[in-house]
Amino acid sequence: MTAAPGGDRAGPFLTGLDIGGSKADGVVTDAAGGVLARVRVPTTPGPDGVVDTAVAALESLAGRLGVAVPQLGPVGVGVPGLVDPARGVLVHAVNLGVGGDGLDLADRLRARCGLPVRVENDVNAAAYGAATCLGLLDVDLAYLSVGTGLAAGLVLGGRLRRGARAAAGEIGHVPVDPAGPACACGQRGCLETMASGAAIAAAWPVESHAVPPAEALLRAAEAGEESAVAVRDRMADHLAAAVRLLVLTVDVDLVVLGGGVAEVGEPLRRAVADALARQAVEAAFLRTLELPSRVRLVGREPVAAIGAAALGRLP
Ligand SMILES: [Zn+2]
């Protein structure tokens, strides 16, 4: 193997990107998923901007490792929106400024960097990354992303399950309250409108942006503030409903909480586990499922980028 110019690392490398609305995370990992380099670059919106953002992240990663971009190995890219993984095409990613005309991201990025490129929905990439990081590829796992929206990814028996129309796990759009708020999807009272980062921000507005709404809410609730306890418990009840839905549908071993809201960490996991326990008090059937002990958290690793890297090498 030829030594990498300017560095002592020569791969083989796996590269993963997670392109979000405001920033893109990039990682280079070894074959076992160990992170060798990590970068974050700002996202430029629009089809051309998304391609430029990916190229900037790759150049920055190559710089970190002291190698040339073509040495980075296969590239996996996680993006929000509807993704056709077979063609590497992305459509309707509102956060990225990509509309119905779509973006042939895999082809365009391949032309720019000379590497094989695979594109995946970001929640699916994060689910695979969570399974990789937590060493859980041998169990059935659901990853529940509680970010601006609410969605889940399923990794069953070590394989990502997208479903027939790539909609598996889109439980944020299961309506739970016919009188609830209108959802962007056209329905009313979707789970996402009741429990998500946006729902928390609406129910617990904060004046300063120094502390995110979810953290401010959970801190106030843990300090015993009555109105905060009520809002937290209502959110936790809806997140618990999401966990129950996932377990009762596919009976996954574990539901892993991730996304921006889950960065709050243990107080969120505890609130959801407590809600599951409350809901099971009068329901012997639910008690046998031992739901509270099946809820986990991801750490602060960039799981979507790590998952994208692992998926990028798959045929
Ligand atoms: Zn909806």
Image: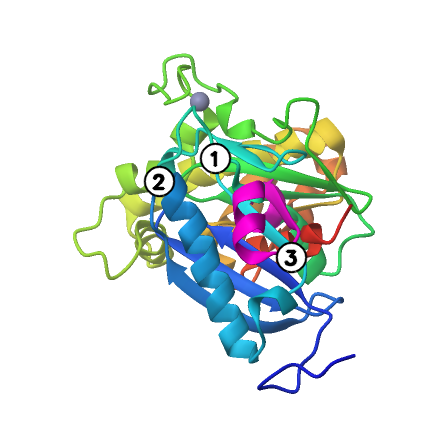
Residue at (48% x, 20% y) in the render: 176
Q: Which label's residue is closer to the chain start, 3 or 2?
A: 2
Q: Which label's residue is closer to the chain start, 1 or 3?
A: 1
- Ligand 1's image quarter is top left
The residue that mark 3 highlights is 309
Q: Quadrant of the N terminus?
A: bottom right
Nearer-the-camera pick, 188 or 108: 108
Q: Magenta stretch?
A: 107-126
Nearer-the-camera pick, 46 or 137: 46
Question: For residue 284, what is the image quadrant?
Answer: top right
* Residue 250 appears left or right of 258: right
Residue 203 visible in this rendered orientation of the protein:
yes
Per the rendering, the mark at residue 46 is 2
Q: Position of residue 50 (x, y in %)?
A: 42, 46
The residue that mark 1 highlights is 103
Q: Where is residue 34 in the image (x, y as percent from the top left)?
A: 68, 70
